[in-house]
Image (cartoon, helix red, strand yellow):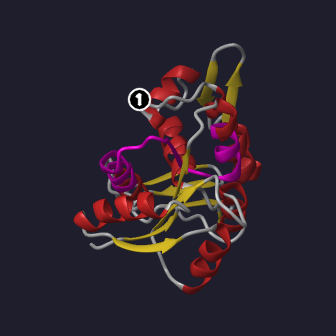
Amino acid sequence: MKRSILLVEDDMLMREFITDYFHKEQWDVHEAENGRIALELFEQITVDLVVLDIMMPELDGWAVCRKIREQSDIPIIMITAKAEDEDQLMGFELGADEYVTKPLSPRVLVARATALMKRTEGTVGKEGEALAFGDLLVKRDAHVVTVAEQPVHLSPKEYDLLLFLIKHEGKVLAREYILNAVWGFDYLGDLRTVDTHIKKLRAKLGDAGFMIATVIRTGYKFDSKA
């Protein structure tokens, strides 16, 4: 299945470099040189993924990410020249799913994009089963989450996190263990990333958010009978 991407990068050479690698992997690429053009394109075309640089003219990546998240749960990978944890936490607060720092390897970027799409499309792990916990229902084959029959719109990373917690129901999971399992051992962020996503996940689950319990000074556990 051919996928499409909206690539938002103000550096023309970098944009062309990244585009070439995505083309080699049979992706359609729509390019935008600044945040304003990116939002205009996003309204006009249908894409599967957004790769978004942070430092851009007119509208920066933070603003573009915020605007996109107001209307869509599309997977977003953010690119930045900065490696500070605070920048990464800001991106995750706004709803980004992955974070890549410059200098970046286009090959690695394409690999992360492909892996993110597989998770989004529900092709990782055993699918086909519905998981029910009171009012919380997760239909893995359809990649659908509902609470009291109302749809819950989760980002790909939030969905991965929820499934990981459910898989280990009743077990206390350390933040570091969650970080390594959901984000990967090569992820450079810190444990606050887990806290940020747990907070957002609970909020989105609403009345079912209580099932994600905090274990003081340790981590979290999923407990549907709490």
Classify residue 213 by image quadrant.
Answer: top right
Q: Please indicate whether residue 10 sits to the left or right of residue 120 in the image.
A: right
63, above or below 107, in the image: below
Between 130 and 118, the residue placed more toward the observer is 118
100, above or below 216, in the image: below
Q: Magenta segment range? A: 88-114
Q: Does the magenta stretch include residue 93?
A: yes
Q: Please indicate whether residue 92 sits to the left or right of residue 171 in the image.
A: right
Q: Say what amino acid the circle numbered 1 marks.
A: Asp
Q: Residue at the location (52% across, 32% down)?
A: 169
Spot the residue most to the bottom: 44
75, above or below 3, in the image: above
Between 210 and 118, the residue placed more toward the observer is 118
Classify mark 1: helix, strand or loop.
loop
Residue 179, x across and y down, in percent? 51, 29
What quarter of the picture does the N terminus occupy?
A: bottom left
Residue 88, x across and y down, in percent? 63, 39
196, above or below 131, in the image: above
Q: Please indicate whether residue 50 sits to the left or right of residue 193 in the image.
A: left
What quarter of the picture does the C terminus occupy?
A: top right
Binning the other alpha carbons within 10 Å of mark 1 as few (below 14), some (14 to 19) or many (20 upward) gives few
Between 206 and 7, the residue placed more toward the observer is 7
Please say whether residue 173 is visible from this viewpoint: no
Residue 33, x across and y down, in percent? 56, 69
Q: Residue at the location (61% across, 25% down)?
A: 191
Q: Residue at the location (63% across, 81% down)?
A: 40
Please say whether residue 31 is visible from this viewpoint: yes
Residue hosting label 1: 186
Q: Please indicate whether residue 143 sits to the left or right of residue 69 in the image.
A: left
Residue 210, x across and y down, in percent? 73, 39
Spot the residue most to the top: 217
Between 8 and 222, the residue placed more toward the observer is 8
